[in-house]
């Protein structure tokens, strides 16, 4: 949530800051701001996207020190006064902040007693004033940053300008991503690599409790014990981290239509020369576990439901899937020798970071499945397996979901050396392409028919139910239609009371084990006036089904036909005139609990 950019010594800092924030809009976009140092601290900010800054910022200005921020509101409503950067009472220090300060109210009370005044509703204004309070006493930023770190509870990534240090950009990091881009005669800072990719391919991921500063020719990082450290830099290919629409009108559509290539790539990376390519130590620990626990949020949780069921069915290993934000506050270990699989597209999900701390205390081995190398979760887990799905810019995850399911299926196949899993996965690619080439217009027609409804239901059983959950989530995320997903058998245990004349009900029937039961559920909702749209496979189809696809291994619905769910949400949102890639109130990387 929220995006940070910062630079020291770069040519045309205005361009870097504006374009960088535009690239970080997926992290938050209710307001944006820029601060820079000339003979004084200058701040320009407003509600809306970074494009608004382009209108209000001076065309040229002379500075070597700049910070910027795009915000997803946590403390305080979206407004100009609550947007970042925030300035200290004595106008000495300004900063931008990602994260949430848990003890902000206590710190605010203390600062009020010291004569400080507050103008916004944010926890960030508390941070900048507390930092100033320490600095006015110590007259030293290093000391002040360490004192600040000792006082703050919660998560934070901070980029800081102090007018007394015109050559230095300060930073402080815990629980929220922040990285440095190394340049020649300049240095950069940002929430992720994308704003910096045009300028450098060498990056340093800061670790929790790191603090220090960058200048034109120097990087100084200190750890929580106040020791000067040399964090290892990594080289990233610019093509893999830059955002390019490649002729598509929206990132979401582009990313849906990359699913077939993502599945191909996943298979080729993790099954080569007729051998699975997973770490043998990982496979050994998984086999020795008496229970595998999955932890995820949102789309990643839905992927874990599929992966857990496949793993259980194919390998006879008991599994339990947990919503990370719930498990963190009721951390039950399901067995004596569990293994934990954490799934996070960004690798920075705050709820999972919370869970990981608990899991590590219990000495349970962990695997992270992520699309982001070098992330906070990756550094903390025993093993990491990368999705290689490519950059996903649209807030609503699509290709990463399909990649998660595909990778979990391959992992399950690797445990018992089942090459049939690879054959089944390869077969889904033809189904995905057939949907892309032959069914989009039919899906768009359904979208036109349902777009004006206030409520939509999705039904399925077993793997079709898991896909229903993801389909429902996508629809509500980007079209703002109230949507629910239910197992077909649960319909008559309460939800059927909500079925009314004309209510759209989208039903997945692709599992031969549950097809007959689902057809009974179809009649139940039809008899109560629902407008039914059935998605089925050829061998299970009946006359009148809305969308029929070729047969595939039924447990791979999350790979084979997830694009149907994604296209539907995309077209509904598009027809309602909404911002498909940047739905309200949401952010791509959820770095607050």
Image (cartoon, rainbow, N blue to C red):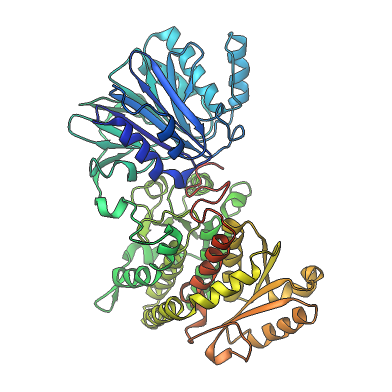
Count of numbered circles on the image: 0
Q: Residue at x 61, y 53 (%)?
A: 332
- The residue sitting at 46% across, 47% down in the picture is 26
Quarter where residue 195 is shown = top left
- Residue in the foreground of this view, choosing between 306 and 394: 394
Residue 180 is left or right of residue 526, and the answer is left
Q: Is residue 335 visible?
A: no
- Which quadrant of the figure has residue 485? bottom right
Front one among 503 and 306? 503
Name the quadrant containing residue 177. top left
Whether residue 403 is situated above or below residue 96 in the rendered picture: below
**Residue 304 rendering spot, x and y as whole percentages:** 52, 64
> Residue at (25%, 30%) from the top-left corner?
10
Q: Which x, y percent locates residue 54?
A: 40, 35
The front one of 115 and 208 is 115
Nearer the observer, 148 or 440: 440
Instruction: Find residue 486 and report its horizontal and vertical position in percent.
Output: 68, 69
């Amino acid at each position: 949530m929220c995006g940070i950019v910062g630079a020291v010594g770069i040519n045309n800092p205005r361009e870097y800051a504006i374009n960088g924030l535009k690239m970080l809009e997926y992290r938050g976009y209710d307001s944006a701001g820029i601060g820079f140092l000339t003979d004084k601290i200058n701040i320009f900010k407003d509600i809306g996207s970074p494009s608004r800054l382009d209108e209000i910022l001076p065309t040229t200005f002379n500075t070597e020190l700049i910070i910027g921020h795009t915000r997803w509101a946590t403390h305080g409503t979206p407004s100009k006064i609550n947007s970042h950067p925030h300035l200290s009472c004595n106008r000495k220090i300004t900063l931008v902040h990602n994260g949430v300060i848990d003890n902000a109210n206590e710190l605010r009370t203390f600062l009020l007693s010291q004569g400080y005044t507050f103008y916004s509703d944010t926890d960030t204004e508390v941070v900048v004033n507390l930092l100033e309070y320490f600095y006015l006493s110590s007259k030293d930023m290093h000391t002040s940053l360490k004192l600040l770190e000792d006082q703050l509870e919660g998560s934070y990534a901070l980029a800081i300008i102090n007018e007394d240090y015109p050559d230095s950009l300060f930073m402080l990091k815990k629980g929220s991503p922040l990285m440095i881009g190394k340049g020649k005669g300049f240095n950069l800072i940002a929430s992720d690599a994308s704003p910096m990719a045009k300028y450098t391919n060498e990056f340093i991921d800061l670790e929790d409790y790191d603090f220090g500063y960058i200048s034109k020719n120097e990087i100084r990082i200190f750890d929580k014990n106040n020791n000067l450290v040399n964090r290892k830099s990594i080289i990233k290919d610019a093509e893999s981290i830059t955002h390019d629409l490649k002729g598509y009108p929206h990132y979401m559509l582009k990313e849906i239509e990359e699913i077939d290539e993502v599945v191909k790539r996943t298979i080729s990376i993790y099954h080569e020369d007729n051998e699975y390519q997973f770490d043998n130590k990982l496979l050994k620990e998984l086999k020795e576990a008496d229970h595998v626990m999955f932890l995820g949020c949102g789309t990643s949780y839905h992927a874990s439901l599929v992966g857990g069921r496949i793993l259980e069915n194919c390998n006879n290993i008991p599994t339990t899937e947990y919503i990370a934000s719930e498990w963190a506050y009721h951390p039950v270990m399901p067995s004596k020798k569990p293994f934990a699989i954490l799934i996070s597209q960004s690798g920075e999900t705050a709820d999972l970071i919370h869970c990981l701390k608990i899991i590590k205390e219990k000495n349970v081995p962990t695997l992270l499945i992520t699309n982001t190398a070098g992330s906070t979760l990756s550094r903390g887990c025993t093993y990491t397996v990368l999705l290689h799905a490519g950059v996903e810019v649209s807030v609503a995850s699509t290709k990463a979901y399909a990649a998660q399911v595909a990778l979990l299926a391959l992992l399950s196949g690797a445990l018992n050396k089942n090459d049939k899993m690879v054959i089944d996965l390869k077969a889904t690619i033809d189904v995905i392409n057939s949907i892309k080439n032959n069914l989009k217009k039919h899906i768009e027609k359904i979208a036109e028919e349902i777009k004006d409804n206030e409520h939509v239901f999705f039904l399925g059983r077993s793997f079709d139910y898991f896909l229903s959950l993801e389909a429902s989530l996508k629809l509500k995320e980007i079209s703002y239609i109230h949507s629910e997903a239910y197992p077909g058998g649960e319909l008559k245990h309460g939800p059927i009371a909500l079925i009314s004349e004309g209510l759209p009900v989208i039903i997945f029937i692709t599992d031969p084990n549950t097809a007959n039961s689902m057809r009974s559920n179809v009649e139940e909702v039809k008899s109560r006036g629902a407008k039914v749209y059935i998605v089925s496979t050829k061998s299970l189809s009946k006359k009148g089904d809305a969308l029929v696809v070729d047969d595939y291994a039924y447990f791979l619905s999350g790979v084979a036909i997830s694009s149907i769910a994604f296209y539907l949400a995309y077209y509904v949102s598009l027809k309602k005139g909404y911002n498909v890639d940047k739905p309200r109130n949401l952010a791509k990387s959820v770095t607050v609990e």
